[in-house]
Image: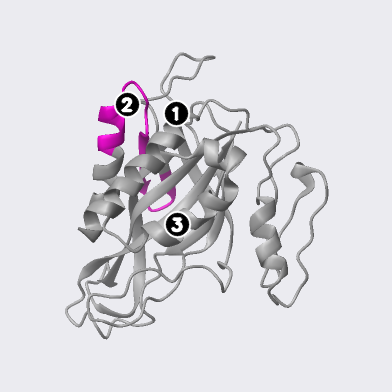
Amino acid sequence: MRLLKFVFVLVCTFTFAAATSAVSLQATELIPREWRQVLEKRNFHESTTHSNSSNDTKVSVRGKNLTPPDKELKLIRVALGVGVQNYTCTNATTLELLEVPAPIGATATLYDVSCFAENHPDLLHALPDALVQVSENVVYAAATIAQYLFRPLTVIIGDHYFRDACTQMFDFSKTTIDRESGKGKIFFGKLEEKVPAPQLASKGQKEPTGMEANGAVDWLRLSTKEGTVGYKAAYRIVTAGGKPPANCTSYPDGEIFEVPYVAEYWFYK
């Protein structure tokens, strides 16, 4: 019964998101004001700084900053990624067992939450912490139900995965067409910067072994690579979960394993 109630809430949430997604995001800041206010209440060794201009905004996180988007760029989409970070405890070249898990990419389903970024940022930033605690299949099922009940609204807008070790892909080609080129939108991302997630970020689900979760994955700034259509920059912020254990003790046979995560992805053009 509790699961059914949660699914109902998710259906309502995604329906609301899709129904009001046609909004202008030009004035929305890289790091939303409500999240900055939370950061300012914590001690990150350096003070959080910001200005009235959205393009000048920088947020100090443990003494480091993500560079803000160029002034000529505009925020055109905010997506919520719900999926897993993948790791291995085996060296891919030598096949030797590793002492520390090595990242081997990620997969996620992308959901449209642009309206939340514009009108309800407090709700948006609560979603990663809430959704990382449940199965991604439950989230997908709720979004699918919302789309079916309220056609032609689109909630599930794309997929995130890695083309290779250095190329992150965000494929919106099945749901969004770029007006200038007439092609489906897709973002091939190159990692430019990363900073640790704030200490207040959700650690995520407990490990299958029952151990406590290991924390939230880093915040990222991504530039475009060849093949990108419709975008010029992207950021991953407000992350929940996704970090591996500190060592491979729980995976003595060198297994590949997954760690659930949720994050906001902000796309600029």
Identified by mark 1, the residue type is Ala
Q: How many marks?
A: 3
Magenta stretch in the rendered image: 144-168
* Residue named by callout 3: 128
Above/below status of 221 relative to 211: above
Q: Nearer the viewer, residue 74 or 146?
A: 146
Identified by mark 3, the residue type is Pro
User: What numbered label is drawn on residue 150?
Assistant: 2
Please give left or right for residue 269 compared with residue 145 in the image: right
User: What numbered label is drawn on residue 19?
Assistant: 1
Identified by mark 2, the residue type is Phe
User: What numbered label is drawn on residue 113?
Assistant: none
Disc 3 residue crowd, few under 14, some 14–19, many 20+, Cα 10 Å: many
| Of the two numbered discs 3 and 1 in the rendering, the one whose residue sits closer to the viewer | 1
Above/below status of 142 relative to 76: below
Please give left or right for residue 208 compared with residue 28 in the image: left
Q: Are marks 1 and 2 in contact (CB under 8 Å)?
A: yes
